[in-house]
Every structure is written in structure tokens, then in C-alpha cells.
Amino acid sequence: MSYEINIGIEVHVQLTTKTKIFCTCANEPEQKPNTNICQICAGHPGVLPVLNQEVVTNAIKAGLATNCRITRKSEFARKHYFYPDLPKGYQVTQSNRPICEEGYVTIKLENGDKKNIRLIRIHIEEDAGKNIHSQFSNESFVDLNRAGTPLLEIVTYPDISNAYEARAYLKELRLIVQYLGICTGNMEEGSFRADTNISIKKIGATKLGTRAELKNINSFKFISDAIEHEFERQVDIIESGGTVKQETRLWDTKNRKSVPMRSKEEAADYRYFPEPDLPVIEIAEKTIEEIKNNLPELPSQKFERLMSQKNLTSNEAEILIDDIELCNYFEQA
């Protein structure tokens, strides 16, 4: 046990707005393939995006609920890469000036203590489409219904120290966006998906080790299993005299092991530059205060209230806040 693990997590939160981020298509990706698209989200040349204001409001809600600083002036950027389900050849996202910065989410540790998991940023971006690979033929199909779906990407510092903390952070963050009413939190449908960056180093060392990224794991249990496996894998490599590669890996749930997906030996050059078709987002202090004053009761606040007002134990309160509908039913009863 001479090694310690450092974990940072990037979560994509799919927002439940009525329409997509830059067009009037309904935000309903689970329809018949390629029926919920228009010239804008299909990336036709010359079309002009128009920002959905509700997306900005939801981002501010998420930032306030996670103790972030709201950026008064933020902007969009183009992130260039080619993928079959990204028709434009670039993704509209935020780069140097994200809408929320330097927040934290408080989690409860196994011993009952509390720990703040620091957030680097929350930024707004559009989702790409979806590739569907046939199990019966050497073919792939592209469904663009999801293209243009509004996302928040929430990025932590490498503050997470084990699988328990990772699961506690993700459960708390998922509850926050559900209580805010901005995301369903359904992991199986991809509405709440996490990329986990894992590295190890000798205890007491200041420099972080080489990280491996585990992509899009869709359950808390699988994330815990993947972290524990990846820690052992990296320790075995270093102890046998090898070097951990910087790469993206997938979690094989059947065989309970991570497998290589692609190398990330060098950072990709996405050629970010400011999105010329979208103006700078300017947020007035009055707007921030209005949104802050209308935030719903958050999970941590409800947890404390249930214990103080309803005389529940911490275990009983935790069971209730984990299920919004059950908790509402309890309070009505």
C-alpha cells in the first residue's frame, strides 16, 4: 500500500429543455432515428445557431448549487474533430471562458466526516449524434437525433481518493441536478454519464502519475469496480518495471476489466477558437440573484430539515432524499 490513487471525474449532464441548444427541434433523442433533426443540428453549411436561453439558466442553477463562481462574461468556442456523428466537423462548446468556475460538492465519508470535492469548471456544450454498430454485419449506422442536445460538462480536480468517494460524489451530483429539475439523471439512457481519470503515485509524492481515462460507465457499481481494477492494474505495471500509458480505456462489465480503446500519448489539437456565430454571454448580477432566490431545496438542505423537523435518523433521511418521488410522498403523507 505504498501507492495512492488520484481520481478526477468529468460528468456530462443532459439537460431536459423542451428544445435543443441551438435550434427549435424537440429535445427528445429517443424517437425514431433521424427524424428529430433540422438543417442546424444536422450541420448544413451556412445555417446560424440561436442559443436556447433556458440552457444558460440551467447552467447558472447548477453553478450556484455547487458553490461555483458565475462568470459574468462567457463565450462559446469551436472544438474541431472528425467523427461520423458530428456532421459539422466541430463541436460548439466553451473553452477559456466557461460559465461556472471553482466550485465544490460536499460528500460524506465512510467515517461520517465531510469532504469537499473541488470543481474546476462547468461549461455548456452540444452533444453529438450516436453511432449504432450492428452485431450481425460489418456495418455502422448514424442517428443524429441526439445531435444538438444541450449538455453541461462538470469537471473536478483530482481530489477523489478511492472508489467510495467517487461513488459518493457522483450520487450527490446526480441528486443535485435531479432536485434542480434540469436532468433526469438516468444513467442507462446516457442522461448522466461520467468519464473517470485515474492515476497513481507513491504516497507523499507531489507529481501526479500518468492517467488513464475510463469512458462513459453507466452505473455507480461499475464505476467502483473499474476504479479498483484500474488501481491494481497500474500498480502491477509499475511494480513490474513498466510505464503506465496515457490512454482511453473501456470497462468490460462481463469480464470485470478495463481494455484499451485509443492512445492519448499526445494531447489532441482541437484548434479551439471563438464561435463566430454566437455572441458573448453577458449575465447581469440581478439575473444571478433572481435564479439564486428561486432555487429549490437541495438534497443536503432537505437531509438536514428531515432530521431536525421530522425527527428522522440520518439513515432514514438518506433513504428518502435518494428518491425524490418517495420523499415527496412521505412529506405529503
Image (cartoon, grey):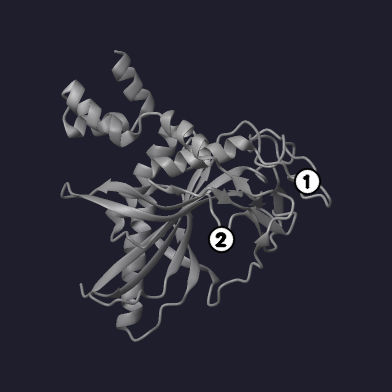
As drawn, 16 above or below 130: above
Crowdedness near tag 2: few (<14), some (14–19) or many (≥20) residues, C-alpha within 10 Å: few
Q: CA distance from mark 2 to mark 1?
A: 23 Å
Q: Earlier in the sequence, mark 2 or mark 1?
A: 1
Q: Residue 39: horizontal and vertical position, in percent?
A: 80, 43
Residue, x 38% and y 59% (percent of image)?
A: 226
Residue, x 39% and y 38% (percent of image)?
A: 176
Is 41 positioned to the left or the right of 317 in the image? right
Q: Please identify the quadrant where the N terminus is shown.
A: bottom left
Element at label 2: loop
In the rendered image, which quarter is residue 235 located in? bottom left
Three-letter amino acid code at the position of disc 2: Asn
The residue to which callout 1 is attached is: 48
The residue to which callout 2 is attached is: 96
Is 318 positioned to the left or the right of 292 in the image? left
Three-letter amino acid code at the position of disc 1: Leu
